[in-house]
Image (spheres, rainbow, N blue to C red):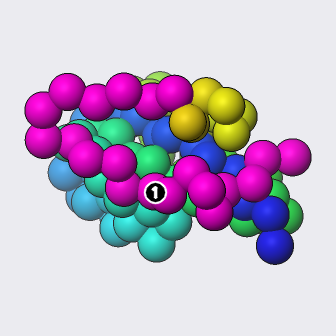
Amino acid sequence: MKSRFIVVAYDVVSDKRRLRLSHYLETYGNRINLSVFECSVPSSEVKKFKRDVAAMVHLSTDTVVFYDLCLDCVANIDRIGLGARQVDPSVVTVV
């Protein structure tokens, strides 16, 4: 099954919603910063993934940004400091 490499960054006001969102995102990937996850989402689940995330936040107070990266972009990610690459780009296929 083909997967998409999606970086999710968020600013969620409520501790309860933020915790729920982070637990959900952990099922798809790894936290690389306090409010940033690298996720490997099966292509067939991308729309559901985004709908599920949208259902967990309040559109009037919270922000979630999805960065859907191509394989070339993933291969060119540079990191400085503690954030080691969490998702192996060789197993991520972008459609």
Residue 51 in sight here: no
> Which residue in the protein does label 1 denote?
87
Whether residue 62 sits left or right of residue 15 in the image: it is right
Question: Which amino acid is tagged 1?
Answer: Val
Q: How many marks?
A: 1
The verdict on residue 25 being magenta is no
Whether residue 13 sits left or right of residue 8 in the image: it is left
Identity of the residue drawn at 68% across and 39% down = 71
Q: x, y percentage for residue 4?
A: 70, 51
Quarter of the image containing the N terminus? Answer: bottom right
In this view, the residue in front, 11 or 16, is 11
Q: x, y percentage for residue 70?
A: 71, 34
Q: Residue furthest left?
A: 81
Determine the secondary structure under disc 1. Answer: loop
Identity of the residue drawn at 58% across and 44% down = 6
Whether residue 73 sits left or right of residue 95 in the image: it is left
Q: x, y percentage for residue 80?
A: 20, 27
Identity of the residue drawn at 63% across and 63% down = 91
Whether residue 71 sits left or right of residue 57 in the image: it is right
Q: Main secondary structure of the magenta part?
A: loop
Range of residues picked out in magenta: 76-95
Q: Residues within 10 Å of mark 1 (few under 14, many from 20)?
A: some
Residue 23 in sight here: yes
In this view, the residue in front, 34 or 72, is 72
Identity of the residue drawn at 30% across and 53% down = 31
| Residue 67 location, quadrant | top right
Q: x, y percentage for residue 5?
A: 61, 47
